[in-house]
Image (cartoon, grey):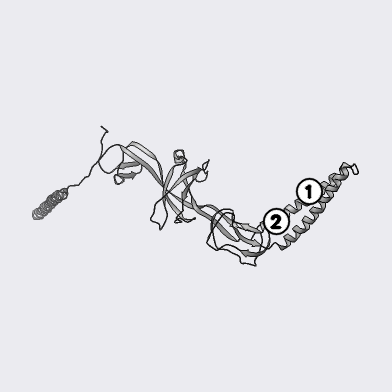
Amino acid sequence: MKVKYIVITILAVALGGMIIYRITKNKSENEKEGDKKGKKPAVTVSGVVVKPQDFSNTISLSGSIDANEQIEIRSEVSGIVESISFTEGSQVSKGQVLLKVNDVELRAQLIQAKTKENLASENERRAKLLLQKEAISQEEYDISSADFRTMKAQTQLIQAQIGKTSIRAPFSGRIGLRNISPGTYVTPTTLIANLVSTNQLKITFSIPEKYASQIVKGSQINFTVPNVADKFTAKIYALEPAIEMTTRTMKIRALTENSNGKLLPGTFANIELALGNIQDAIIIPTEAVIPIQDGKKFSLPITVKPRK
């Protein structure tokens, strides 16, 4: 029994010694690894010194280029196209005849109306003489006078209809592709061609309502268009008097010169609108500002230099 207890005691002491040795060795290894990890390379930190300066507050917007004037050429009267007096894609002048609708029937009606007018005029003259001699009553003379005025108005109406058979350009501009040919029967619903005035163009765009009070009529904007390297300018000439309820924006329109023809209506425009200069503004580099959950913070040390 004594031998058994002695063996158990020796084994327990050996096991305890091994456990103590293992714990001591692990602790030593962890301390060494911690020392190695603690030796981190130095971090390079860049700082910025900012000072108050004047800042031009400019916003970027998108807009569209529209023709100064644009209409669809249509005929007010129905009839056969007798002749076309314009070339597709050419420049036309205000008042220039673009096409002529056949007016043979209207001219025949005009001759008939003039004949009736002349007869009514003669009857009115005779009735006036008889009235002066008290041979007829005032009522009979009034009837003759009314007939004359009616025939005169009928003649003027037919003359106006004949005038509408010559379709003229309401303003100077460039006419587009025609959709008819000589001999086509046209009606007021027939689209003949489009007429566009491009010497001046309108730039239409919208701004958020928070900037509406900063826009002044007559202000200048800069804009560019795709695939054109030039930078263009325009002057604001009209502002919508109310804010659009659905978009919370205000529509603005500017006018630009286009005598060289580089700009085309319907083109997309990138607009830069200057809202004004801010004095003593503190300008922080964008890379130094980091958005966080509750706002923004600076990632670089910033020192504000006061104005002397």
Q: Which residue is mark 1?
A: 149
Q: Which three-letter amino acid code belongs to the residue tagged 1? A: Arg
Q: Picture coordinates of residue 152 (x, y %)?
A: 77, 51
Q: Using the image, determine if residue 298 lies above or below residue 176.
A: above
Residue found at x 73% / y 62%: 105
Taking depth in this image into account, of 60 and 193 the one nearest to the observer is 193
State the separation of the CA atoms marked 2 and 1: 19 Å
The residue under label 2 is which amino acid type? Gln
Residue 250 position (above or below residue 108): above
Q: Residues within 10 Å of mark 1 (few under 14, many from 20)?
A: some
* Of the two numbered discs 2 and 1 in the rendering, the one whose residue sits closer to the viewer: 1
* Residue 199 - label: none
Kind of element beneath mark 1: helix
- Position of the N terminus, as image quadrant, is bottom left
Near mark 2 (Cα within 10 A), the count class, few <14, some 14-19 or many ≥20, is some
Residue where numbered disc 2 is placed: 161
